[in-house]
Image (tube, coloured by chain):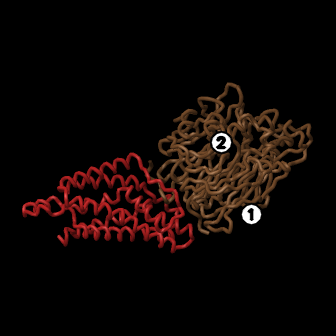
Amino acid sequence: MSIMPDPTFYPSPGMAMKAAPEQIAYVALLNVGKNGKRDAMSVIDLEPGSSTYGQLLGQVDFPNGDNELHHFGWNACSACLCPQAPHPHMERRYLIVPGIGSSRIHILDTKADPKHPKIVKVIETEEFIKKTGYTSPHTIHCGPDAIYGSALGSASGDGPGGIFLMDPDTFELKGPWEKDHGPQNLAYDFWWHLGHDTLITSEWGTPNMVKDGLNPELLLGGKYGRKLHIWNLDKRHHLQEIDLGAEQQMVLELRPSHDPMQTFGFVGVVISLKDLSSSIWMWYREDGGKNSKWAVRKVIEIPAEPADPEKLPPLLKGFKAVPPLVSDINLSLDDRFLYVSCWGTGEFIQYDVSDPANPKKTSSIHLGGIVRRAAHPKKPSVALNGGPQMVEISRDGKRGYFTNSLYSPWDEQFYLDGIKSWMAKVDLDSKGGMKLDEKFFVEFDGLRAHQVRLQGGDASSDSYCYSDPQ
Amino acid sequence: MTHAGLTSTMLWLMLLLGAYHGLNPGMGWLFAVALGMQEQKGSAVARSLIPIAVGHAVAIGSVVLTSVFLGMTLPLIVIRYLVAALLVGMGIYCLMRHRHPRWVRMQVGFRDLTVWSFLMASAHGAGLMVVPVLLRSNTVEAQSRIAGHNHISQTVAPLAGMLATGVHTVAYLAVTGLLAWVVYRKLGLALLRKAWLNFDLVWAAALVATGLVTLLI
């Protein structure tokens, strides 16, 4: 405990936007197959004036490989300032790193030397399953009262997946969060509207449905997730299920408005069985009223691109088209710009969502892609594989970073040559527009880069309890 | 000494402790500010202060009245050690590890806020902190024993306890209300980042100090 509040905690998203630019990024690195390497957390230099800009500053190797490290998060964030039970003298210090492949959770301490974090605790598979009843922990968020995490499945690897709680002081698992799952079975991402006591979850597939690769039978049968679930955050029970439609498959990343007073947010859908398009949906409250039901509508549709079957992996040959495969999205702290990664077509798109029901495309960049293989200006002769995937936006909304691997068992199904991993950066214009930073292109040797977290917080790490003055 | 064992010193101390409790962001004004911001209405700040004050008063009053009734049956020395032990124990616990009552809800009505304020004040030992003020001093106790008044309560009388609670609550409400208003209207929440001393540490230290003083007065 410190005497003054952690300087990286901000009451409102607008105040967080005034934070100084981040200097380093933590990027999860995944070992793939039996190459003798272990998983790792890497530290990348983001300081433009530095002689090591865009290079690996340090790397902490994990005890094992095959953890499949996905969406890690901080032990504490701006939610510590929330008024119901404020504890502002915690420190943003530990990274909570879940592995969907192993059901382990690694805790890293970044305080002593931020460039060389240390593993201080490992929650082993057996303990995770015993204490939570779940497997495949996926996403971590720090909440006003605890660390929350989502998990893809039950102990058997089937449903229901759900949410678990962790003590933010001791990192002890507190068990499953739900008191009543209602009809919910599939799980993936979760986040909340803290000002409205509402938690939202999305659907991918159970561990058994995803661990051996994308299963065409399940996909064409519409068995992957297609729903959103609305929960009472306080009472921990299921309130409402929203079906996006039979042809929508894999409802993934949830990006609620950062403004705690607002009640809208965006979710990306990977693929439509009708035409292979990807889409972004907006959820909102019907009639804008406090007690009314939640609803969802499609606000962006990104079509598949016709392609020469010769250049397509077996999974896609018959379709003669490359799907956008929107995998990750990110919302700037002012709720103004939505960033969308199209991992299939290798496109990164910026939308102005000032009017969330009517997004306007403001800019687009190509890098990699199943067919396009667009090169980076720093290495113009090298055709890139993978595409923009995990994306993180800086608190001030001026920089974006993304990596190119999706999920090991699925990577090779779409990129037959396997993913050679890289990380890129875009400079973002506050009025709309973006440009690749030609000096920033990180290549990873033998490991695959996934989630990016920026030092001090970023646009998907913190939750706020106070609005900015209008 | 005034009526029913309540001295003016006691009332001043109750007033000061009320003001002190009002300063703590975790026990009132910050939630009021948040609710004002949520509704974008200054009146929401004012409205929320009423249940917050009621909850605080109930938390203080229930501990005060409990000690008043215990004071009618137990010898002063027992009460004194009991209160001191509780205060020091609670202070040390808070120093080592700060726990809050679990509370996530932001959409709160009158009853929710009253319960919240009661829980927060109780969990912080706010009621316990004022009990030593209302204990009779050893000198007074000795004097009354010499005078043969063995069955007089070792604390103030019940009505006086309620009056003391009222004085405390008025001071608490004045300070927490003033802070809520100044932060909501003038200073803004950026203040939190610069001026939010670790109240939990100060508070824990205050609990221990009060416990020790209880043994000495």
Residue at 72% over, 56% down:
A338
Q: Is residue A13 visible?
A: yes
Does B101 sit left or right of A49 as displayed?
Answer: left
Earlier-in-chain disc, 2 versus 1 = 2
Q: In the figure, A41 relative to A298: above or below?
A: above
Mark number displayed over residue A357? 1
Residue depicted at x 81% and y 38%: A414
Q: Colour of chain A?
A: brown
Residue at 35% x, 68% y is B169
Q: Are marks 2 and 1 on the same chain?
A: yes
Task: Specify the amino acid type for callout 2.
Answer: Gly
The chain painted red is B
Are the residues tagged 2 and 1 within 8 Å (C-beta)?
A: no
Chain name for mark 2: A
Question: Between marks 2 and 1, how big is the CA–CA gap?
Answer: 33 Å
10 Å crowding of disc 2: few (<14), some (14-19), many (20+): many
Q: Which mark is residue A159?
A: 2
